[in-house]
C-alpha cells in the first residue's frame, strides 16, 4: 500500500518534469487515442454519478482507499468525507475539457483535465474550474480501472476553451 502510493507520487513528479506531447502526435497514435476515449468515458461516468448522487456508481469508479489531495487545507480529503460533501451540493452542470492520458504501465494511468462545475449554493449559480489529475489503477483481469487518488487545484480566471 505504502509502496504503491510512493510509486504514484514518483509517477506524478515524472509527469511534471516531462513536457507534454503536442496534440497532433497523440491523434496519430492509435493507442493514445484509444486510451483518451476510454478514460474520457470513465471520467464522464464519474461526473454523471456525482450529478445524479449515485453512490453505487461512484463505488465502481473510486477505490476503497481513494483520497482527494488539494493545496488548500486540510490538504487530504478521505473518501468518506468526500462522499458526504459531493452529495450535499446541488450541481447544475459539469463538463471536462483538455483531457490528456499518460499510460505509465498496463496497470497505471494518469489522467488530467480541466473540470468546470456550475452549482447552486446561493440565489445565483456559481461556476468553478479545477485542474484535475486522477491516478487510475487496473486490478484483476480485463478493464477493472478504479481511481485511487485525485489531485485537485482551483483554476482562477480560466479562459473557457475546448
Image (spheres, rainbow, N blue to C red):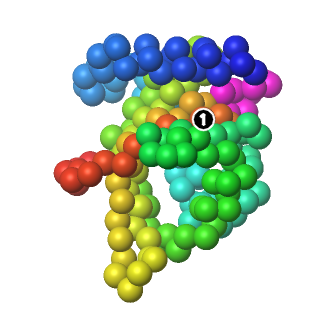
Residue 15 point in image, percent of width and height: 41, 18
Residue 105 point in image, percent of width and height: 59, 14
Q: Residue furthest right?
A: 140
Residue 80 point in image, percent of width and height: 72, 52
As helix, strand or loop, the secondary structure at mark 1 comes to strand
* Residue identified by numbered label 1: 149
The residue sitting at 45% across, 45% down in the picture is 72
The N terminus: image quadrant: top right
Q: Residue furthest bottom?
A: 123
The residue sitting at 40% across, 32% down in the picture is 100
Left/right of residue 67 with respect to residue 155 in the rendered view = right
Q: Which residues are magenta?
A: 137-145
Is residue 152 shown above or below 116? Answer: above
Look at the magenta stretch and give its main secondary structure: loop
Whether residue 144 is in magenta: the answer is yes
In the image, 101 versus 112, the foreground residue is 112
**Dot 1 alpha-carbon crowd within 10 angstroms: few under 14, some 14 to 19, many 20 or more:** many
Amino acid at each position: 500500500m505504502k509502496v504503491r502510493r510512493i510509486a504514484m507520487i514518483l509517477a506524478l513528479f515524472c509527469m511534471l518534469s516531462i513536457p507534454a506531447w503536442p496534440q497532433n502526435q497523440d491523434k496519430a497514435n492509435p493507442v493514445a487515442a484509444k486510451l483518451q476515449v476510454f478514460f474520457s468515458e470513465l471520467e464522464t461516468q464519474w461526473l454523471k454519478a456525482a450529478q445524479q448522487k449515485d453512490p453505487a456508481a461512484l463505488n465502481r469508479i473510486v477505490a476503497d482507499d481513494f483520497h482527494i489531495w488539494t493545496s488548500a487545507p486540510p490538504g487530504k480529503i478521505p473518501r468518506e468525507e468526500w462522499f458526504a460533501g459531493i452529495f450535499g451540493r446541488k450541481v447544475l452542470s459539469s463538463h471536462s475539457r483538455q483531457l490528456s492520458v499518460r499510460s505509465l504501465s498496463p496497470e497505471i494511468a494518469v489522467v488530467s483535465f480541466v473540470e468546470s462545475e456550475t452549482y447552486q449554493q446561493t440565489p445565483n449559480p456559481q461556476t468553478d474550474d479545477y485542474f484535475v489529475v486522477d491516478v487510475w489503477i487496473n486490478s484483476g483481469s480485463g478493464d477493472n480501472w478504479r481511481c485511487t487518488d485525485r489531485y485537485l487545484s482551483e483554476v482562477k480566471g480560466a479562459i473557457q476553451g475546448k
